[in-house]
Each structure stands twice: as C-alpha cells, then as structure tokens.
Image: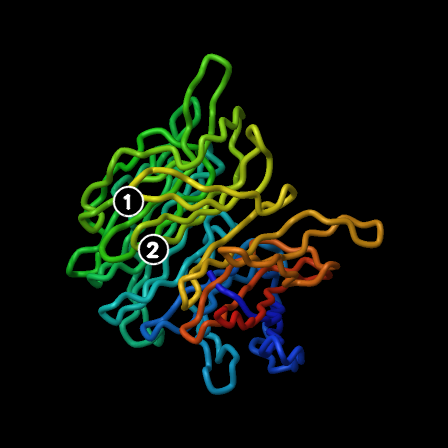
Amino acid sequence: MKTRAIYLIPAALILFHTCTSQQKKESLATVLSQQEGWAKTVYLTQDFSGLPVLAWTEADGAGSTSTLYFSGWDTVNRRFSERIRVPANPALVAHAEGMPKIVFSTDGAIYAVYAVRIESRHNPYAARIEYLVSRDGGDSWTDSGTVHRDSTQEAGHDFFDAIALQDGRIGVSWLDKSYEKGGRPVHFAVTDHSGRFTHETVVDDFACECCRTALYERDGVIALLYRDIKQTASGTVRDIHYSISEDSGRSFREGSVYSKDEWRVDGCPHNGPDVVTQKDSLFATWFTAGRNKGLFYGELDYATGMIKRQLLDSEGQFAQLALLADGRRIAVYNAHRAADGDARQPVFARTFPDGETLSVSGADDTTDSPVVIGLPDGSAIAAWISRDGAPARVKYKYMDFPAD
C-alpha cells in the first residue's frame, strides 16, 4: 500500500530515510528482526490511528512452514517497532497474489487473514481462508475461524483481499472453488456483530482462476476488482472487471469491464489488479497482454463510465496503488531491466496526476511484490521482497511527496 525505505532480512530489517527534496541525505536506522528465514510476502496497511503497519511472512530453511509477523510505525524514530508474531497456521499460503493480511477494524480488533494449504490427492491447490482475531493489540488471539461457507476438502479458496469497513466490520473477497473446466466464482463476505463471517455473496460466477481480487471502501461504497473470463469462439478473454456495493457488501452490482483490453489467453496470468477510490472516481492498476501489452494505470469516472488509461511500463508487472494525503495517487511496481548485462527487476514509483517515474529499489536490485501506503503527513512507504543474495529479504523505503 505505501512507501519508504527499510531492509528486512529474514534476519534483519534496515531502514533508509529519505528526507525532503532539498535534503537528499539518507541515514541508516535500526535492525528490526534477527530471525533467519526466507521472506515470502510483504503487505502494508494502517492501524487504528491511520499509521502504517508492515506485515510479512518468513519461511523456514526448508520452505515447508511460514510464520506471519507485523510491526507498527514509530512516529518519533521513523522506523517500524518490535515485531509481533501471529500464531497463524504454519501451512499458510505465502505468495504475492494471496499475501496474508493484517486488518485493523474500527471497533478496536485486529484480524489476521490468510489462506492455508489443505492436503489433497486430487487438487494440489486446495486451500481454505482462515482468520484470527486479537482484541488486545496482538498479545493474544482467538482460535482460527473460516471466512467462507464452503468446506469441501478438495476445493481451493485463495487470491483474497481484506479491508476494514467504516461500520466496524471486516470485508473479504476471494476466488471460491474452481470449476472442472477452469474459472472460479468471486465471493465476498463480511463479519457480523460477533466478529464472525456470516454473510456471503457471489459477486461474479465465472472469473479468472488465479489472479488476486482487490477491495477498497470509501463513504460506505465498496469497490471490488478482479480479472473476469469471457468465453469466445476463438478462446477466452481475460480483462479486468469491477463491481460496486452501496449497501456495505450485502449486494453487488453486476460486474462491468474496467478496461476493454481484449486479452485472449487460455490460461491464468497470475497477475491481478489493485484499486483505490475517491468520491467520483475509481483508480486502478493492472497488467494486460491484450492489444497493448504492459502495466497500466486508469481513472474511471463513476458518472459517465468513461476511463482514462495510460501505460505505466511496457515491461512492468506486479503493481499496487495508494492515495497520498492530498488526494494524489501513487503506484509502485517492478519491471524488467538490463543492468551490467544481467536481467534485473527493480521497483519504481509514480504519482498521479503528472508525476515523474522514480527509482525506489535501485537499478541493480531484483525484486518481487512491491506494495505501497500513504501516510497522514503526505509521505509514503514502499516495501518489497529483495532477491539479491540469500536469503530473500523484505526492504522498505520512506519517501516525501510535498504538495505542489
């Protein structure tokens, strides 16, 4: 969700603070964690006060089990504080299209939401989505519950997103169990007054089977983005669709095409969208290899249904989007580049409207899964997985974006 500079080595987290545009100075901060492990996923969210929280997973040396941690932002020292371990199932699924998430509800509860792999003879991707709840800041947690109604042992449930709704509830979107010939339905569920997921609805009955869903709420209106499937005589078209709920997730409008890219591909791209909204507009980032290949940013006007889209990077892939304090949008993504004769995949950032493209990770870094979040003071934090050397590390970077 947002931007700054730190390095989280499954053993350590190191921070680089970028000062104002007049102060180009960077200073080394502190080590956050000392555990040996391989960083698998990273996620940024905000706590009850709107301050950033970094959540990440580390796998053991064999890669057979993973541990979920999160850490809150220290505003005085401008660094993440001591990590908190979440007692999630060690068989949790840790990948960029379904990264485990920490959600802070407006009623004071912390939710950990993650997918867990299920042993299956017939479906290697069988999984269920579990959640834990803490009401004391992460010191203790409830037993795990299941987000979805379906409990079929052979079914897959994954590629989810989770958000805190303004009324104190938690909303989760995901891809439910797949059909025999491909495709999966998009589901959404919300918690009830007890904190359990009880209301579940089908948003789209046939969507791409392994691209992440994306959620955002503003003023009680929930936007849900996903990659849909349209069957044609010449194959399947897999373009980004959106659906809106105006009743806090009890129902959703029929999905509409966000950008008509006409990407014809008989297989899942494993590359979903991201979304943020303002009063009159829905902003998104997405990848396509349709009529124009690359990573795109778009602005949809709710009133007219018209979209303005622009190419972020023809070699870009995974992208995440956030709002800055003044309403500007910031996107982070990684893209293929050549450096010293080697293929690299550094992280870039760009603000909208009319912002420049900035190098975040450095040109010689190979990265996965960048995420970004805006801060109340107008700055932003970006985090990503660095694969330069072993073990893989989580890095983050703090950046100022002064208003024009």
Observer-nearest of 26 and 127: 26
The residue shown at (34%, 55%) is 278
Quarter of image, res 169:
bottom left
What is the secondary structure assignment of the residue under circle 2? strand
First in sequence: mark 1 or mark 2?
1
The residue shown at (27%, 72%) is 135
Q: Position of residue 388 (x, y in %)?
A: 72, 60
Residue occupied by mark 2: 278
Vertical order, 105 against 196 (above or below): below
The residue shown at (27%, 33%) is 254
Q: Position of residue 128 (x, y in %)?
A: 37, 46
Q: Residues within 10 Å of mark 2 (few under 14, many from 20)?
A: some
> From the viewer's perspective, is the residue at label 1 or at label 2 nearer?
2
Answer yes or no: is residue 68 visible.
no
Q: Position of residue 317 (x, y in %)?
A: 59, 45
Quarter of image, res 86:
bottom left
What is the secondary structure assignment of the residue under circle 1? strand
* Color style of the picture: rainbow
Q: Which mark is residue 67?
A: none
Q: Return the residue found at the far top.
A: 233
Count numbered badges in the picture.
2
The residue shown at (41%, 68%) is 325
Answer yes or no: is residue 178 visible.
yes
Q: Position of residue 130 (x, y in %)?
A: 34, 53
Q: Return the residue found at the far left.
A: 193
Residues marked 1 and 2 touching at CB (< 8 Å):
no
Vertical order, 379 against 310 (above or below): below
Residue occupied by mark 1: 188
Observer-nearest of 372 and 184: 372
Q: Residues within 10 Å of mark 1 (few under 14, many from 20)?
A: many
Quarter of image, res 24:
bottom right
